Image (cartoon, grey):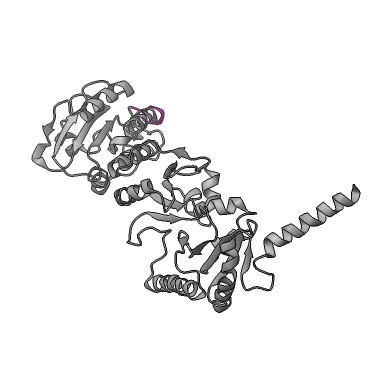
Amino acid sequence: MRNDIKSLFVFAVCWFRFSIEALYSSTSDVINLTPQNFDSRVIDSNEVWIVEFFAPWCGHCQAFVSEYSKAATALKGAIKVGAVDADQHKALGSRYGVKGFPTVKIFVPNKAPIDYSGPRTAQGLVDAGFRELKRLIDNRLSGRSSDSGRSSAENDVIELTDSNFKEKVLDSDDMWLVEFFAPWCGHCKNLEPHWKKAASELKGKVKLGALDATVYTVTANKYGVQGFPTIKFFPAGKKYSAEDYDGGRTADDIVRWAMDKYNENLPAPEVVQITDEKVLKDVCENSQLCVISFLPHILDCQSKCRNDYLEVLKQIGEKFKRNHWGYLWSEAVAQPELEDALGIGGFGYPAMAALNIRKMKYSWLRGSFSVDGINEFLRDLSYGKGSSVPVKGAKLPKIHKVEPWDGKDGEPPVEEDYGEETHSEL
């Protein structure tokens, strides 16, 4: 019984060695590839590889050995030639869609694997290998890169890989939409022009990337990609998780969905003090609507009182941040011409006007200067309700240069003590 077990063990060891070396010996120029070394040798390299996926029992594979070995010797030093026992390493074969033997694929840096369908001769393999090598060199000379089987036309979609994903996406402060695709996927091909168009329209706001999930499996597996295309959203700042994209697949759908996310994550606009004309123009000319508040003089409303009003404005800015409006404030009577042009005066302080600088029209707050009162006022404006009137003079009035508020309480001016003078008689 013990001898039988020993014999079975010896047989198993011999069979294991046979499965690896039955077709290509350790002295062959064909490099043995396994799941342990495939990514480091092939995927992460900057070289062109020709890889055969074989089964030791396959008659066609056995007949192919001589020509394949001859090609490996001829290409030595120029193109790498390897072989995978896909019968033993089934998962590695499945990863590249291997269904029959022998299957030969050409791997080019940063590009989806290319199926070799030429003659099973050394010359055919050499010709195909050099053809891909020439394309790679031409692309490098012209400044283009291989792009995972997609069009090399210039576009705003950023190519992502296992090696650059952390740096470009996870460690960035930008929002990202990432498409995980497969080169053979029909839905992915249909999505491609829409993805490119959306990337151009969202430039500067949300970045769009694409990752070939059949090549860069580490990242694809990390995010549970099982079908194609799979789209994930990565928020701005620290990225602890990804959110599934659940929008449509046209460029308009993608842009609309991404802009909703962009607006949700926008910081509240700053409430800026009007200290000179440039400040007012910088805010108002870059906003559809400019919300200008006139707060009581610091002697009538000290720092806590003023900060309470500014907090109200910050809350309003947060609530309406999707509108991309600008928010300004001035101390009462510090900008008299502006107050006059916007009809402020006689109503007391605080007061507010919403200015459309392009149309030179404004509306003023008639309700209370509170979160609820201002919310109702601005909500009506956002829906196109409410009346507006022309700015007096139809142009921006003179803006005075003033010192910015230092955040402190105001101090009343010190009165001079003019007592009676005593005149000595001469």
Of residues 365 and 82, the one drawn nearer to the viewer in this rendering: 82
Residue 303 magenta: yes
Instruction: Give the percent coordinates (x, y) of residue 244.
Output: 44, 38
Above or below, comparing residue 240 to residue 102 in the picture: above
Residue 290 in view: yes
Left or right: 94 as drawn, with respect to 228: right
Q: Is residue 127 above or below residue 339?
A: below
Q: Name the image quarter holding residue 265.
A: top left
As for residue 195 lying within the magenta part, the answer is: no
Instruction: Name the spot of residue 270 as percent of width and height, x first.
Output: 35, 39
- For image coordinates 90% across by 49% down, the residue present is 2
Instruction: Kindly tell me whether residue 202 is visible in this rendering.
Output: no
* Residue nearest the observer in this picture, 73 or 38: 73
Return the x and y of residue 235 as percentages of the image width and height: 44, 41
**Which residue is drawn at the image coordinates 51% and 47% (left, top)?**
220
Q: 309 or 88: nearer the eye?
A: 88
Residue 42, by quadrant, is: bottom right
Total residue callouts: 0
Q: Furthest-right residue in view?
A: 2
Q: In this view, does 12 lie above or below 406?
A: below
The residue at the point 17 percent across, 41 percent down is 357
What x and y, as percent, mark residue 303? Answer: 40, 31
| The magenta segment | 301-306
